[in-house]
Amino acid sequence: MFWSEAALSTRTSSTSGTLAPEGITVDASYGCEVRQYEYHGAWVIVAAGEYDMGSITPLREALNTAARQYPKVVLETSAVTFADSAFLNLLILTHRQTGRLRVVAPSAQVRRLFEISRLGSVLEIRQTIEEAAAS
């Protein structure tokens, strides 16, 4: 289920079950969805859907902006259903720009890409947004 299909009054985080903060911005174009908000000094980006060369733009824009403005960038990927080399390339570039990209709750698809590419040994992988923001 995409965030746009959920009732706004229940804004729950997929990783912790807690209410997501107010002020969330959403981009639900290109068959994917990007939500973003600040959490304890970290900029959190929640990605959902399919990411390839044709749909990566909203996520790229969100990560580029976050990397320029925040020392901590957290990418929550539990709802990413497809990702390819465009997604991996974006994560590598963001990691280089921030010095430390935190990826939260990678979906099975994302975990598999990390295993194949060995990117999981480079990025900081966390189970919850709270844990990533605190690190």
Image: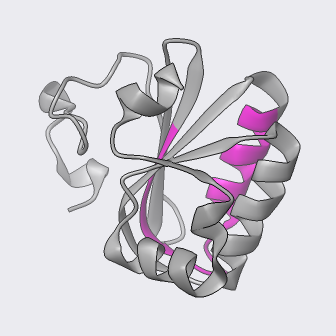
Name the spot of residue 46 as percent of width and height, x first: 45, 46
Please, is residue 129 above or below residue 29 in the view?
above
Q: Furthest-front residue in view? A: 121
User: Could you say where residue 41 lies in the image, as x and y percent from the top left?
Assistant: 58, 13
* Residue 37 seen: no
The stretch in magenta equals: 45-67
Image quarter hosting the N terminus: bottom left
Q: Residue at 63%, 56% (x, y): give it.
A: 59
Q: Quadrant of residue 89?
A: bottom right
Is 72 rendered above or below residue 112?
A: above
Colour logic: one colour
- The residue drawn where x is 28% and y is 50% is 4
Is 84 one of the magenta-colored residues?
A: no
Q: Is residue 69 left or right of residue 24?
A: right
> Does the magenta portion include 56?
yes
Left or right of residue 98, residue 41 in this image:
left
83 to the left or right of 68: left
Q: Quadrant of residue 31?
A: bottom left
The residue closer to the viewer here, 55 or 124, is 124
Image quarter hosting the C terminus: top right
Q: Residue at x 14, y 39 (%)?
A: 7
Residue 64, compared with residue 58, is above or below; it is above
Relative image position of residue 54 (x, y in whole percent): 66, 80
